[in-house]
Amino acid sequence: MFGYYLDLALRSLKRHRVLTGLMVLSLALGIGACITTTTVLRLLSGDPLPQKSDRLFYAQVDPNAKEGYIAGQTEPPATMTYVDAMFLLHAHRAKRQAAVALTSGKIAPQRANERPFYSDGVQTTADFFGLFDAPFEYGSGWTAADDEGGSRVIVIAGFLNQKLFGGANSVGKTIRMNDHDFRIVGVLKPWSPQPRFYALDLGGHDYGGDGDAMFLPLKTAMDLKMGPQDIECYNAVTDVDNLAAAPCMWLGMWVELPDQAAVADYRTFLANYAKQQVAQGRFSRDETALLDLMGWLRDQQVVPDDVRLQAGLAYGFLLICVLNTVGLLLAKCLRRSREIGVRRALGATRGAIFGQFMVEAGIVGLVGGLLGLGFAELGLFGIRHQPAEYASLAHLDLSMFLFTFVVALVASLIAGLLPAWRACAVAPAPQLKAS
Amino acid sequence: MEIRPILASLSKHRIPTVLIVLEIALTCAVLCNAVFMIGQRVSAIRLPNAIDEHSLSMVGLSGTDEKTAGSDIPRNLAALRGIPGVQAAGAISTLPLSHNNWGWSFGTSPDVSVFDKKTVNFSLFFLGEGADKALGLRLLEGRFFNADDYADSSFGSAPLPETHVTLVTHSIAERMWPGQSALGKTYYTTSHYYTVVGVIADVLRPNIDGPGEAANYYSAFFPMSAEGSKGNLRRYVLSSAPGDRDRVMRAAEQKLDELNPNGVTKSAIYSDMRDQYFADMRSMAWMLVLVCVVMLAVTAFGIVGLTSFWVGQRRQQIGIRRAVGASRSHILQYFQTENFLLSGAGVVLGMSLAYGINLYLMRHYEITRMPWYYLPVSAIALWVLGQLAVLGPALRAANVPPVVATRSA
């Protein structure tokens, strides 16, 4: 029976070529727009560290003054002071913990007659690499002792190693950064989580790029006065060079907590710390927060507004396209009332008529989906040539490829439902009489 | 034109009628909001900025020794001024729309604290001698900094300049001392205070919010001596004839590279920097335009398709009407009026939907209220579109010969 419906549907579609073309085209445009924007949206709201994102937490406390504080409503600031971060770090209450800030440094070339250049870097503490599963090509991270002593050690990214040492094992070699010598202890494999979750709100970009080029101990960076990218001060500052004591927030604090019990413990620990600071008069708010990685990404609304607007717009557009297809299919099948009447009179059941029209709608959907896939590739190609920082990431993956056909079929079957229902409700007798 | 027969005929085809009205309504709603968003972006991209944007180029120089800045900066500037075509040159800490922001909040009374709600956040710009001319700042009142102001300024250990004079933009003057002259007035923060010696035309901040915000222009300028700059005068601005910018910029970068073998230079023409700042916005605006055009086309084709079918269905009726005396223009008018009614119902529904979508977007995104005139303008656009789309099928209907009436269908 299906083969027969298929044949009927193809004949009918061929008979009204222009109309069929219009239906397929409008459905394809709607699907293309949806797939393009959904791909980008999914990409940007994806999990940057799927294997352990549920065990990573971002700790926040609030050293701001009482003014403007509404208990339970005012969220703590995104970053921490050095004092608070060091306390949490040294308390060792989590499996791993790291304080993070961004920086940049001037790197001297290895060969003469080349110019120095600037690279983006991260100033952090020893656990950083284990905490975030940063993969090493050569060597490893530094130790807690390096943190305490402010050792001149550095971990560099693969691309920087390529540029400076042609990709050879450079562990133990020296590079000159900001006119100081650093010993390379590790070289990372390509590592560029999207979004760059560990540095949201620390300045710089959230998406794109090859990842940060160098990683060095926090204390070393502070000794050399390599300021962080972003500083937020909550009180009058007398000495901005002494960031360790300044009332300024600039560090992100990450902890790894293996299970629910550990999370609950850490929450209590954090809350007690804030209460104790309030009691000592250092804090006036006892608000704290401990969001997991994905929760933190949502809280920071890391997906740009424009991307979410585009997706909403695309779904609105698809709705218009589906409405359009419904209208056209309906008009088409109502014109075929006589044919339906004949088929019914010859013994076709309502179900058979319904099936026939749904097959027709399904074909429109499939062809629309195929063409829509083409439009989506075109749309993504367009996005890759946009100036946005996430542009280079826009590629169709297998799941989106399959999703396209699901969208296409669902859209076309929904579009076909009403016309098919109207068609099978046609009473045969009046149609036969009219002719 | 009698509309009752049209309504009677539409009520016989209720489902297609509802569908087309819904489609027009949705298109109208999306169109209103999309056009509004395009308008917002276009006005942001076009925000005025009172510096000589078209004669400016910039070379950033970092990685040099801060301790020798006192002699390096004058030496670098002398070399830059020697480049043919350079009309003025100066060193500055940051530029409008450069993303490199140094913000601080100030109040108008001496007992102001950092926590004070009444303080206003400014972006601070530190000007080396000559940078005011190179930028082309436009003085509205008072004076620019003089040699003493420059000599008397430096950075200490505080994150604020050690000087007591400042230039503010017109927008700051209006915000801090509304209705008064800002000249001679002082603004304060806990440890520092600054007295206004001049008011300049509005210069954009390094980062801006949406269009229409006065805060986009809260830029304050301070003098800064080369010796006391502590590495904060890192950008050299050059003014030249627009046609010379490219050459001047390259020559300047080469010069600074030669003079500062240990430094890293990065150069740009200012108008490119501005374009770069708005690049995302511009591409979003174009995307919205594309969506609008395609959406209008889809809707128009929907109208064409549906009307064509109606025309086909009613060939015999049309023939009868023609046979009993209706002229071609009567038939044409029939379909045009029918479309006018459909579009009318669609846009009325669409306008309320558009308003609702705007309210939703205001709640969940950084979007302001849509001015009312977007609604009727979109409505008229859809009306015109509907009339154009229906013209083809309606003309075909008008060409149905009366003799059709006598044939059995």
Image (tube, rainbow, N blue to C red):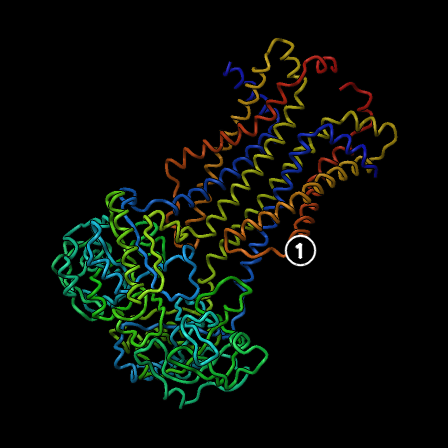
- Residue A126 vertical position relative to residue B253 in the rendered view, above or below: above
To which quarter of the image does residue A347 belong?
Answer: top right
Would residue B97 be seen by someone viewing this image from the given angle? Answer: yes
Would residue B87 be seen by someone viewing this image from the given angle? Answer: no
Position of residue A22 measured from the top left corner of the image (x, y, whole percent): 59, 34
Q: Name the residue under label 1.
A: B373
Position of residue B172 measured from the top left corner of the image (x, y, whole percent): 51, 75
User: Label 1 amino acid?
Assistant: Tyr
Q: Which residue is drawn at 57% across and 77% down?
A: B178
The secondary element bearing badge 1 is classed as: loop
Q: Which of B123 and A252 is in front in this view?
A: A252
Furthest residue to the front?
Answer: A279
Q: Which of A336 and B183 is in front in this view?
A: B183
Q: In which quarter of the image is the C terminus of chain A?
A: top right
- Residue A232 vertical position relative to residue A429 in the rendered view, above or below: below
Position of residue B331 measured from the top left corner of the image (x, y, whole percent): 80, 35
Viewed as shown, does residue B41 lie left or right of A299?
Answer: right
Position of residue B100 measured from the top left corner of the image (x, y, whole percent): 39, 68
Q: Residue at x 56, y 55 (%)?
A: B38
Viewed as shown, does residue B375 lie left or right of B335?
Answer: left
Near mark 1 (Cα within 10 A), the count class, few <14, some 14-19 or many ≥20, is few
